[in-house]
């Protein structure tokens, strides 16, 4: 199984400040077709998860452009350029190159 | 509008069975890989099972192999999860999901 490791596991951010979450996979997520099977999900308090980013850096329709994803191979980053109160929740990276697995989750709170 | 509506959760005794259903709408169900994902109380996300568009490929997390069966009926736009020999550690919210959308989940509690 591919192990996904997120850091940090908790983040406290002042509104308007940036935030960054790292995700490392135990194997490369680069597919033979050139795409990379790395997704970012956000679970807001009391809600089901939602997909933010697919294939490393593509925002799903409706996701604010303050969210951006980057990385390649085994190392990936989710960045929020200016955190807003509505961004609180648990952020998960997920790989789908093999049977899907998630990172442990990063809990973002507002200072 | 995409909708995934789960049902079938509830309280069941250890060793018992439940069948979860997920009714899909707003997209071409038969074109989509589908998955069941669970979240135990206070824990993270775990994919339980996935199924290919035509239902001919199915994969499971090791902890449910031989106990859970994923299936689909493309004519009914529905996804299913048959759960047998349930254990306390199967207690969780079970979500139906496709690559870009999640349902609201159905709660399964395994307890005597």
Image (tube, rainbow, N blue to C red):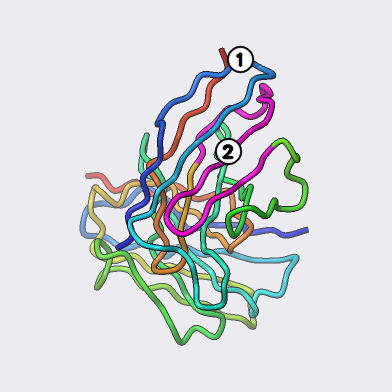
For residue B76, above or below residue A86: below
Q: Which mark is residue A14?
A: 1
Task: Choose between A18 and B53: the one closer to the eye.
Answer: A18
Residue A74, position as x, y percentages in the image: 42, 55
Left or right relative to B107: residue A57? right
Residue sitting at the far top: A111
- Which residue is pictured at 70% across the width and 51% down the height? A59
Q: Which mark is residue A47?
A: 2
Residue A22, position as x, y percentages in the image: 46, 40
Q: Which mark is residue B104?
A: none
Task: Tell me the mark number nearer the camera, choosing from 2 and 1.
Answer: 1
Residue A41 magenta: no
Residue A79 magenta: yes
Q: Earlier in the sequence, mark 2 or mark 1?
A: 1
Task: Choose between A82 and B47: the one closer to the eye.
Answer: A82
How many C-alpha atoms fall within 10 Å of the one at disc 1: few (<14), some, or many (≥20)? some
Quadrant of the snapshot with the C terminus of chain B = top left
Query: In terms of image quadrants, where is residue B85?
Result: bottom left
Quadrant of the snapshot with the N terminus of chain B = bottom right
How many C-alpha atoms fall within 10 Å of the one at disc 2: few (<14), some, or many (≥20)? few
Residue A79, position as x, y percentages in the image: 60, 37
Q: Main secondary structure of the magenta part?
A: strand
- Which residue is pictured at 32% across the width and 68% down the height? B68
* Mark 2 and mark 1: Cα distance apart in space: 23 Å
Magenta highlight range: A67-91
Left or right relative to A55: residue A25? left
For residue B88, above or below residue A18: below
Tags 2 and 1 both on a single chain? yes
For residue B102, above or below residue B22: above
Left or right relative to B19: residue A69? right
Disc 2: host chain: A
């Amino acid at each position: 199984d591919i192990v996904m490791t997120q850091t940090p596991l908790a983040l406290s951010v002042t509104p308007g400040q940036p935030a960054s979450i790292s995700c490392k996979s135990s194997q490369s997520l680069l597919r033979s077709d050139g795409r990379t099977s790395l997704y970012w999900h956000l679970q807001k308090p009391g809600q089901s998860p939602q997909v933010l980013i697919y294939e490393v850096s593509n925002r799903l329709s409706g996701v604010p452009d303050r969210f951006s994803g980057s990385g390649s191979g085994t190392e990936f980053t989710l960045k929020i350029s200016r955190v807003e109160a509505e961004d609180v929740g648990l952020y998960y990276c997920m790989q789908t190159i093999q049977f899907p697995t998630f990172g442990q989750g990063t809990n973002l709170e507002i200072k | 509008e995409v909708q995934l509506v789960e049902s079938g959760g509830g309280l069941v005794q250890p060793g018992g069975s439940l069948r979860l259903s997920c009714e899909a709408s707003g997209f071409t169900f038969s074109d989509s890989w589908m998955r069941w994902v669970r979240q135990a109380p206070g824990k993270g996300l775990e994919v339980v099972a996935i199924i290919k568009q035509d239902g001919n490929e199915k994969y499971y997390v090791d902890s449910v192999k031989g106990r859970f069966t994923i299936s689909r009926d493309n004519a009914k736009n529905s996804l299913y999860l048959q759960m047998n020999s349930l254990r306390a550690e199967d207690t969780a919210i079970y979500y139906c999901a496709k690559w870009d959308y999640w349902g609201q989940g159905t709660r399964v509690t395994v307890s005597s």
